[in-house]
Image (cartoon, coloured by chain):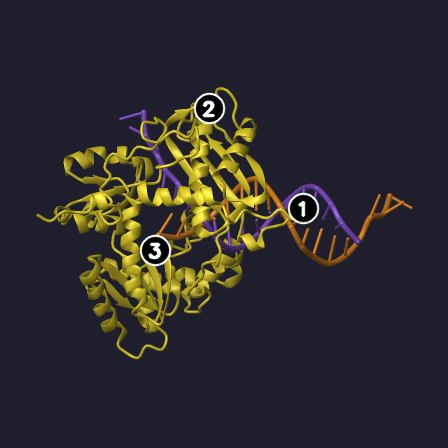
Chain colours: A yellow, B purple, C orange
Amino acid sequence: MIGLCDADAFYVSCERLFDPSLHGKPVVCLSNNDGAIIARSNEAKALGIKMGQPLFQVSDLVKQHAVIVKSSNYALYGDISRRVMSLIAGEVPDSAVYSIDEIFVDLDGMKCDLTEWARKLRTKIKHETGIPVGIGISRTKTLAKVANRLAKKSSKANGVLVLDDQKWIDLALARTEVSDVWGIGRRYSQKLAGMGISRAIDLRDMPDAQARSLMAVGGLRTVRELRGVRCIPLDDNPDQRETVCVSRSMGKEISGRDELNEVLNSFAGRACSKLRRLGLFSSRAQIFILSNRFKSNRPQFSRSCEIGFHPATNDTRIMCRLIGQNLNRIWAPGLEIKKAGILLVDICRPEDAPVDLFSIKPDTNNTLMAAIDKLSDRFGRNAVTIGRVPKPSGQDWYMTSSHRSPSYTTRWSDIPIVR
DNA sequence: TCTGGGGTCCTAGGACCC
DNA sequence: TCTGGGGTCCTAGGACCC
């Protein structure tokens, strides 16, 4: 059997850990730029606030019901996540972290009542980390997802649901909308609805060939998993990631060449720092700029270009220099740029990096970059930056984040004080 | 006024190879 | 008139996830 532990409204739960006054109240957490709602407490859900909804669309509701609004605080959430995950990993034979708030666990060979075991685990997690989780258990990852969803929805299940018996699986699938199945998004739901398939149980009973032609091999895998056939391995993560991306929407559109250069240089700094922390190098990057897709009365554009590095690098200075040299390939006067970014592709470990004719190898002993990383760890991300990249604070392009909670667990100055 | 960011995988089609 | 077959690699676009 496979289990899925998934935290309830994880970001909200993290905020509540350090501010108990938030319990029982409607709370939402926002995306970058304070744009959209990406986590909701049950009370906020009950008000009809939708996942992904832009904040401004619910501003009346927020005022009317005194909804508490929080900017996202990834330093805090990441740290809490690590605590929860390592606790769970210690309780099972095998596990695989799937996202910041989800972990799949392998329960094969466990000789006990799984419902009882899961209840105990759930209590333990709540007790030791303060985070409420739901646990769903079944034959495959996709079915465990179904179980997990019902575990949270049903008051009878009270956070734990084991789907083993076929009769119960059938009932669960009959109660699950096809759009709530893992792997079935908006587009596939629409297609399926057009064919009269609205419930997970109908999807399960669809012929293989039809599933395959409609939704490719991934869709077929989903259908088979619903039948109880394991098609997705417990740990489905590639051993090495393939891209690193840093991109942002800006508080307001920018147009100037220098301004764009600043933005991209600062993103390149972040991207290189990510690479160095992973011990990886990149030999190719794409820089891109986008218009504001919501302003349909303005000209729309999406421009990008590729930049190669020889040898592969993770040195911020090299990337910044090449960005400057290539900027005119995407920038043009008069463009109103809302979003920009850098995508590093062709990521590799230094020993696997392509070597050119003259055997020039990636610089794996970059003392300057190492020093910058150390200073950033100690004094904050922008303690030291490459010349001509001004500090983000005070930059009008920098994202807005007006409801940010302190970094209680990752910054000494933000440690909560008990009086 | 205000609409997230960072990933993965699959497929079709074109360029190119012998 | 008649114009191969079998590959690989790359890219763009579309789907999905949290």
Q: Residue A358 — which label? A: 1
On the image, the x and y values in percent for residue A338 come to 41, 29
- Give the crowd class for mark 3: few <14, some 14-19, many >=20 residues within 10 Å: some
Q: CA distance from mark 2 to mark 1?
A: 35 Å
Of labels 1 and 3, earlier in sequence is 3
What's under tag 1, amino acid-wise? Phe
- Place residue C11 in its image quadrant: top right
Q: Which one is in front, A138 or A86?
A: A86
- Place residue A414 in its image quadrant: top left
What's under tag 3, amino acid-wise? Glu
Q: Is residue A336 visible?
A: no
| Residue found at x 46% / y 36% | A341
Q: Residue A177 — which label? A: 3
Looking at the rendered image, the quarter that the N terminus of chain A falls into is: bottom left
| Residue found at x 27% / y 56% | A7
- Place residue A123 in its image quadrant: bottom left
Q: Which residue is mark 2?
A: A258
